[in-house]
Image (cartoon, rainbow, N blue to C red):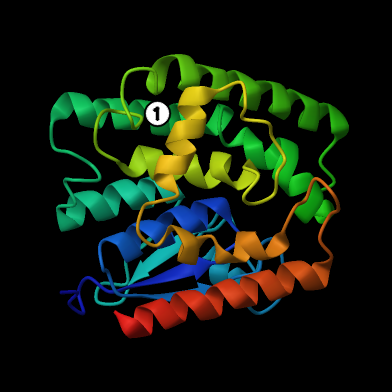
Amino acid sequence: MTTEEDSVILYGVPLSQPVRAVIWTLLLKDQDFELVMINPGSKGEMGSRNPDYLRKSPSGTIPCIEERATGFVLSEAHAILCYLSRKNGWDDLYPTNIRIRAKIDSYLHYHHRGARDASLGLFAPRVRKDLNIPEVMQTISITLLTRAIKLLDSAWLSESPFLTGHGMTIADIAAYVEIGQLHHRFTNLFDFGPYPNVSKWLDRMALVEHHDNVHASLQALGNLAEKSPTIDDIKDANKMGYALINEVLRRS
């Protein structure tokens, strides 16, 4: 049961991949939290570039958590996942075995110039047109992403059902929110046909509890291979995802 000391405020939006990783983890561990919507890149009252938010997250990125009891704040999804796992003893998601934990850490460090390029190369150019990501950067990111998926297929997932062994960890959650968003069940922006181990892993992760709730906002965007969403589409998807997550929290 979550105590006041454990309760956190999570700043972000459901369409953000790193935010989804933290939401999913908190829901899996039945951890109470309040999701506060923060508009990425905005200087408005609830924007990530607003001075009030920058005092919590100096980089102006989401997610960021704030502990109700202590006022402690922390940004960067992977740091948040590791911190919460250590603090709360979530040894199933972040095992205490020193070598398994080292493998998880290894993946989390690699992720930023691998699976994370799914967003920079394919997702963000369609959803965050305000970023004006240069075409050459998109091309490089798609190359890096493809290389990462090949590596996951031939190495990380070649002999085990999950990235670091037979149990799902925060490494799988971090990887899935980036790579899974490209699957045909969501945006349909990448062909996983040549990668059987990754394809099986994606299907396996889709069966994990709360998957559908966490990814409902992404589902609402539909097939982005056919057309890019409008600003209203993006706002509506985030609002719907926010409402659904709050409904799940009320039921728990």
Q: Depth check: 40 or 104 in front?
A: 104
The quadrant in which the N terminus is found is bottom left
Crowd tier of the residue under label 1, counting other residues whose Cα lies within 10 Å: few below 14, some 14–19, many 20 or above: many
The C terminus: image quadrant? bottom left
Can you name the residue that lies furthest to the top here? 154
Circle 1 is placed at which residue position? Answer: 107
Closer to the camera, 69 or 115? 115
Q: Position of residue 159 (x, y in %)?
A: 32, 18
Q: Is residue 104 above or below residue 158?
A: below
Q: Residue at x 36, y 26 (%)?
A: 106
> Which residue: 30% across, 28% down?
164
User: Taking the image as drawn, is residue 150 in sight?
Assistant: yes
Picture quadrant where residue 52 is located: bottom right
Name the side, left or right, on which 26 lies relative to 86: right
Expressed as whole percent of the image width and height from the top left, the position of residue 165 reads: 26, 28
Q: Visible in this render: residue 43?
A: no
Residue 81 position within the rendered picture, expressed as x and y whole percent measured from the top left: 34, 50
Q: How many discs appear?
A: 1
Q: Quadrant of residue 146?
A: top right
* Disc 1, SS: helix
Q: Residue at x 56, y 65 (%)?
A: 216
Image-quadrant location for residue 119: top right
Question: Which residue is painted at 40% across and 59% down in the image?
Answer: 24
Q: Amino acid at mark 1?
A: Tyr
* Residue 206 in picture, x, y percent from top left: 45, 49
> Could you tell whether 75 is left or right of 85 in the image?
right
Is 155 located above or below residue 160 in the figure?
A: above
- Of residues 67 and 217, the one nearer the viewer is 217
134 sits to left or right of 214: right
Whether 22 is drawn above or below 69: the answer is above
Farthest bottom residue in view:
250
Tell me: residue 95, above or below residue 3: above
